[in-house]
Image (cartoon, rainbow, N blue to C red):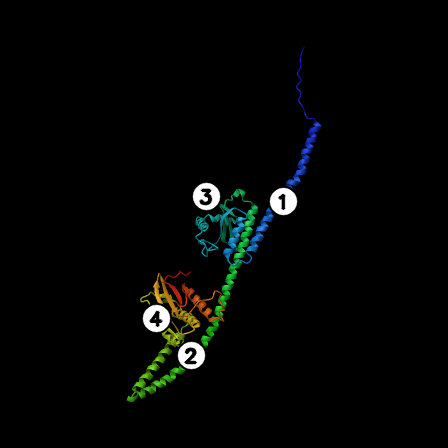
Amino acid sequence: MRLHKENTAEIEPFYISLKGMETAELEEAINAPLKNSYSNSAMLEKYSHMFQNLSSFEKETDNAREASTVTDKLNRSLKRILPVKDSALLFFDESFHSLIPVDGSANSDISKVMNHFYKEGIFNLLFESGNPMIVPELNSYNNDGAKLNYLLFPFYEDGKRTGLLSILSTISSGNFSPMDKQTIQMLLNLSLAKINKIVLKSKLKTTYEDLQTYQAKLSNDFRLAAIGELTQGIIEDLLSPMQVIMSNVEFLNNTPDQEEEVKLIKSQIKKINSSVKRLVKFASVNQQNNKIHPVKLNDIVVEYYNLVKSTLDNANLECVLDFENNIPSILSHPNYIFQLLTNVIGLIKNRSTAKGGLIIQTRFNNDYILLKVVTTASLKTNAAKDNFITNPTELNIRIIENLMKKHEGEFDISSYHNTGSAVTLKFPLRRKIRK
């Protein structure tokens, strides 16, 4: 007898396999719109986040008055996009020798690194291409911590390189999306527009203040010119009678009984003649020929003091000269020193309410010549500047500031509680090389 084993295997019927295929295709067809919907939803969420970030930055910087405020808000907006450790907005200086942060913190770590990169020529490709660049932060790659990179965004003005935005982050080229790049570029453009607006406002304000100063100075110059014309006529009127008096005094000189009176008359005439000569010398200075040269500050102050001594006496201001001997000469012109002293004393006279005094000092200290006027008057200035035309005190201060800028020097007013004030003018012995 022969036994045959049956080896049976369950095979799925053909029509059932077709049915399963139809079901899989049907499920795939049904899920496809859901997948597309999810992808579109994620894209809409990213765009929504981008516009919310831009809108928030615009509102936060709308009334910004300082560039540092804009950079702070920019750094906060960048942190909403990337894991930012630090960021800096840097501009080239006038000579393109270095990069300077907007907030002036030149000693910051990121500023030092960027200037090192610039000197090494790393930014040449960055500015030639005009596209953002990622540069590794090498110290982080040598350590076990997070790996950091610098994201660099260049910017230009009228086709010339102006500066760059540097972002220190853990982001790398592999996970830096085009949308994030686009958002940062838009934030950078908004920031630059805000900063340019602040700079233009500051320049406009400075120009307006200078305009007020020069309007007041022009009005003052017209008055001085008119006084000068009158003074010239008065001097001529004084000199002629003085010559007649001197001629007649010589006849009286032969009378012994009137010898003392004649000496007194002669001394007074000499005093008037000396005052007239000083006044003529002071008024005849041609401002167009004020070429700077080394001058002795002590001699100029003494000459000025002799000229205005009677004016100070009439204003009940006692003046004492306190000089340091053998101080070096400064680069200036006597007329500039006269103008400085005139405005300093005018400032003191405007603030003096009773009898007072002042001390004019000169000192040599650390490559500076100090001209210091100590007074019993209170020269404390208001935080908000008044109109220069209506307030002569502010005009005096602005003229002193402008004259000290010409000398590349410094001007300071110090007030002491119930004891007076001091005006300090610092003239540097070393001047910058003029281009």
Residue bearing mark 3: 140
Q: Residues within 10 Å of mark 1 (few under 14, many from 20)?
A: few
Alpha carbons under labels 1 and 2: distance apart: 87 Å
Residue bearing mark 2: 231
Residue at image location 68% in from the left, 35% down from the top: 26
Alpha carbons under labels 4 and 3: distance apart: 64 Å
Secondary-structure class at tag 4? strand
Q: Quadrant of residue 38?
A: top right
Residue at image location 70% in from the left, 27% down from the top: 14
Q: Which numbered disc, 4 or 2, marks the residue that appears first in the sequence?
A: 2
Alpha carbons under labels 1 and 4: distance apart: 83 Å
- Residue 410 vs residue 79: left or right? left
Q: Residues within 10 Å of mark 4 (few under 14, many from 20)?
A: some
Secondary-structure class at tag 3? helix
- What amino acid is labelled 3 in the image? Ser
- What amino acid is labelled 2 in the image? Thr
- What amino acid is labelled 1 in the image? Ser
Q: Is residue 237 above or below residue 189?
A: below
- What amino acid is labelled 4 in the image? Leu
Residue bearing mark 1: 41
The location of residue 126, given as percent across then percent down, is 49, 48
- Residue 34 vs residue 196: left or right? right
Tally of marks: 4
- For the view shown, which residue lies furthest in the left direction? 256
Circle 3 or circle 2, nearest the eye: 3
The answer to whether one can see residue 72 in this image is yes
Depth check: give the residue in front, 79 or 167.
79
Q: Which numbered disc, 1 or 2, marks the residue that appears first in the sequence?
A: 1
Alpha carbons under labels 4 and 2: distance apart: 28 Å
